[in-house]
Amino acid sequence: MKRTLILFSFFLLTACSNNTIDETASAPTEKIQGTTEQTAKENEAKHTPQDDLDFAKKAFTWFEESRLPMYNMRDTTTKDKNMYNGLTASMSSNGVNVLLFDNEENAKKYESDTFSMLTKGRVLLSIKDEANADNYVRVLSEEKAIPDLAIKYLSPQVEKFVTQLNTYKSYQDFTNQFLKFDQPTRTSIYQTYLYTREFEWEGTVLDRDTVPEGLILWCGPQAKKPKHWLDSKGKIVSLSDIVVIKLKDEDTKAYIEAGNKVKFKGKMNRIWNKEWNKNWEFIDSEVIK
């Protein structure tokens, strides 16, 4: 799926008191005109990594208060520093990432014709929720929440599915709707709305041994439960109703046998993809019944 990467100039923080950015506020006009490059470097140096992280967090607050999809928000500065030269701070979510660099030159290194970009300033906005790309740009440009923002979806069908997520009470209720979409649409929905989202589903234990830290469950109709779920190489076959859960506490398996019906709670970590031979997978799972 295409990802939108946008670099912004409308900021870069001058006053730590409000975490907004003004590239000229602390320098006289004559100095800016005469030594633009020197002034830019001086202004960039005034902002600490903590200032930049605070700004990224504030941007996430604006997105969230604008009702944009914001799931799995986290500080990814340490991880992203291994991938981006000159990165000072980053916050990530399922739909969008906000990354800040020590200077505009380092930010520009990540321009690419593969992505849709605007390069001005030290901020890199990486948008995965492309339906709302313009909305993320607008909120960040105005540096404030926009509560009446019109949230966009890939299609009316996707909007209906997403807005009704909390009404699907069982695995089959959920998949009966989700699997109607083509694979690219499923992937987009998963990346923006489902990754690490917690679900509670029920299933029958097929296997407690193949996955060392988890269980293989059958969550489809009992009449269709397979007799074999491993291929000749011992790998799990890709069936749409097979679910792999990885347990928080592996000791839970001591009380579970194949054939038991269980209810589990876990965070979605992978969706079924027949072409890639992938099954549903949940992490941080607990058997609650």
Image: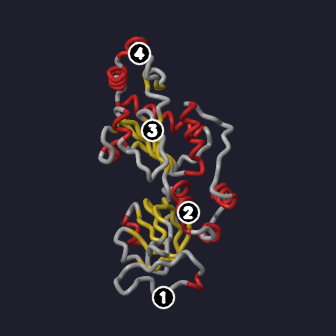
Mark found first going from the N terminus, 3 or 1: 3
The image quarter in which residue 52 lies: top left
Mark 1 or mark 4, earlier in chain:
4
Residue 215 is situated, as x and y percent measured from the top left of the image, at 42, 72
Q: Which numbered dot is residue 200?
A: 2
How far is the residue under mark 3 from the one under mark 2?
A: 43 Å
Q: Quadrant of residue 276?
A: bottom left
Left or right position of 275 against 232: right
Q: Nearer the viewer, mark 3 or mark 1?
A: 3
Instruction: Label 1: state its secondary structure.
Output: loop
Q: Nearer the viewer, mark 4 or mark 2?
A: 4
Residue drawn 68% across and 38% down? 148
| Residue 227 numbered mark, or none | 1
Numbered disc in front, either 3 or 2 = 3
Q: Residue at x 51, y 39 (%)?
A: 60
Label placed on residue 26: 4
Closer to the N terminus: mark 4 or mark 3? 4
Q: Which residue is mark 3?
A: 119
State yes or no: discs 3 and 1 in contact (Cβ < 8 Å): no
Residue type, mark 3 in image: Thr
First-in-chain label (3 vs 2): 3
The mark lying in front, picked from 1 and 4, is 4
Q: Residue at x 40, y 71 (%)?
A: 253
Residue 248 picture location, percent across and down: 40, 60
Name the amino acid, label 2: Glu
Question: Could you say which is closer to the camera, residue 249 or residue 116?
Answer: 116
Secondary element at tag 3: loop
- Gap in Å between the C-alphas at discs 4 and 3? 23 Å
- Residue 25 in view in this figure: yes
Residue 42 left/right relative to 70: left
The picture quadrant where one finds residue 103 is top left
